[in-house]
């Protein structure tokens, strides 16, 4: 019985690791682009605008990981072991989901940093809300219509026709609205946690530097 359970868990983990790794990779693409675009570059060139479009095309992949909780529900039904679910499955899913959403949070923090740097700080909260709304649509397209970020290039006609037609229905609008509220709420919480941890580390670094400066050189 134990051997069968372990074998089933290993099989499920092997299957999950493939799509989890891929989804995390897609989630970290906009994070990497946000560092390049908003921390090290200044807008204006065609290359920057191209990177900016790619950034927004891939950004929904980060909060999309929140919807992967449906796989956790399926896995719980398959395993039916409290210990395996508690000690293996749930921590693994939490790591992946939080990692993906944190990539989303840091990406928007970098975007806000850029707006602040160019003197547009008053636009930060507006840009964040617009981004949450666009990502809510992107998450719906990805989860229910199975569109990918690169479909903007490979099949733009289908994306514009089927994608736009679908989101105009009552049920899709409700789902998108709920997703928008969830993204806004979770982002508000995670942004404060992330900035709080960042400021704490900065203070520790400053205090450590001050202590070292008072220590005579040997």
Image (cartoon, grey):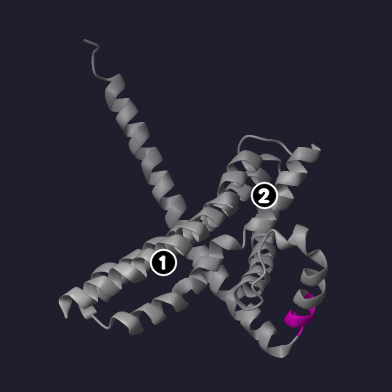
Asked if one can make out residue 87 in the rendered structure from this viewpoint, the answer is yes
- Left or right of 167 on screen, residue 109: left
Q: Are circles 2 and 1 on residues that touch, CB within 8 Å?
A: no
Name the side, left or right, on which 190 lies relative to 59: left
Bounds of the magenta segment: 164-168
Residue 128 falls in which quadrant of the image?
bottom right
Q: Residue furthest top?
A: 218
- Asked if 64 appears above or below 57 in the picture, the reply is below
Pointer 1: what residue?
A: 16
Percent from the top left, x then y, of residue 40? Answer: 62, 34
Pointer 2 local density, CA inside 10 Å: few below 14, some 14–19, many at least 20: some
Q: Nearer the viewer, residue 35 or 143?
A: 143
Pick whichever, 1 or 187, lies toward us. 1
Structural distance between the alpha carbons of marks 2 and 1 = 41 Å
Tell me the SS state at disc 2: helix
Determine the residue positioned at 45% across, 53% down. 194
- 99 shown above or below 74: above
Indicate which label's residue lies in the foreground, 2 or 1: 1
- Residue 99, magenta (yes or no): no
Q: Quadrant of the N terminus?
A: bottom left
The overriding secondary structure of the stretch rendered in magenta is helix
Callout 1 secondary element: helix
Q: Locate residue 197, reporting x and y percent.
A: 39, 50
Label number found at residue 196: none
Mark drawn on residue 121: 2
- Residue 5 percent coordinates (x, y): 23, 77
Q: Nearer the viewer, residue 81 or 12?
A: 12
Residue lying furthest left? 2
First in residue order: circle 2 vs circle 1: 1
- The vertical placement of 134 against 25, above or below, is below
Q: Quadrant of the C terminus?
A: top left
Residue 191 visible here:
no
């Amino acid at each position: 019985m134990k051997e069968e359970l372990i074998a089933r868990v290993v099989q499920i983990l092997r299957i999950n690791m493939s799509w989890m790794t891929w989804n995390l990779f897609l989630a970290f693409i906009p994070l990497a682009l946000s560092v390049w675009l908003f921390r090290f570059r200044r807008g204006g060139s065609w290359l920057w605008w191209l990177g900016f479009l790619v950034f927004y095309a891939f950004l929904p992949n980060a909060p999309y990981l929140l919807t992967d909780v449906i796989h956790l529900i399926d896995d719980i039904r398959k395993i039916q072991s409290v210990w395996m679910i508690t000690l293996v499955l749930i921590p693994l899913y939490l790591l992946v989901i939080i990692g993906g959403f944190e990539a989303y949070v840091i990406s928007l923090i970098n975007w806000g940093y850029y707006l602040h740097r160019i003197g547009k700080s008053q636009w930060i909260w507006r840009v964040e809300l617009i981004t949450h709304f666009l990502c809510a649509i992107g998450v719906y397209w990805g989860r229910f219509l199975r569109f990918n970020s690169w479909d903007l290039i490979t099949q733009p006609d289908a994306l514009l026709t089927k994608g736009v037609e679908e989101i105009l229905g009552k049920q899709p609008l409700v789902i998108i609205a709920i997703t928008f509220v969830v993204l806004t709420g979770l982002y508000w919480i995670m942004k404060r946690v992330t900035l709080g941890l960042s400021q704490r580390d900065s203070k520790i670094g400053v205090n450590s530097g001050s202590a070292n400066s008072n220590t005579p050189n040997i």
